[in-house]
Image: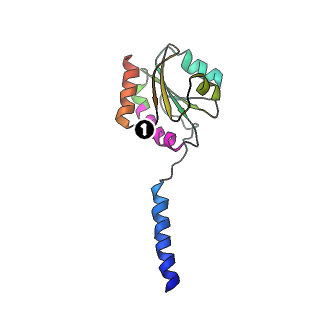
Amino acid sequence: MGLQRIIVPLGIALVIVAGCGAPYEPEDPSKPVVNVAHARSAAEFQRLVLQAQTPVFVDFTAVWCGPCQKMAPMLNALAPQYEGKVAIVKVDVDVVPQAAAQFGVENLPSFLVFRGGKVVKRSVGSMSQSRLRGMLDDAAGGK
């Protein structure tokens, strides 16, 4: 009876703790999403972001970054709505650290809007879907 008093509450505690940090699957860049590109090199970043003719919304992210991985499904869901208005590019800072360094990205996630190769807006940290949509709307409208 004494051992059961310890094991049952311990089991319940483990279930509660395990549920707190809901597991997430890291985003798989090999699964295409409409209007989302992945810059996998400095040359690709140059082409996709700095030489783009349309505004570009850049998501600086990392596989190990929990908040980044939680933002990914939101951004992926919104991306198709902005096709032709705003290009969306994801940059893994571990794969293309030069881009992160060049634009002073020190915290993740970081979101930068580029127009004509220049940063016109920046946001750091997780955000609500409505705030993310607002940032994309601003990028599309040229604000």
Q: How is the image coloured?
A: rainbow
Identify the residue under disc 1.
74
Q: Position of residue 23 (x, y in %)?
A: 50, 52
Residue 40 vs residue 120, the one in the foreground: 120
How many marks the image carries: the answer is 1
Q: Position of residue 140 (x, y in %)?
A: 39, 20
Picture quarter with the C terminus: top left
User: Dot 1: what SS?
Assistant: helix
Q: Is residue 96 magenta?
A: no
Q: Position of residue 86 (x, y in %)?
A: 44, 22
Residue at image x 50%, y 35%? 109
Residue at image x 42%, y 38%? 74
Q: Position of residue 129 (x, y in %)?
A: 37, 36
Residue at image x 56%, y 21%? 48
Residue at image x 53%, y 82%? 3
Query: Which amino acid does the dot numbered 1 rest on?
Result: Met
In the image as oriented, which residue stretches furthest toward the bottom? Answer: 1
Mark 1 neighbour density, 10 Å: few (under 14) some (14–19) many (20 or more): some
Segment tinted magenta in the rendering: 63-78
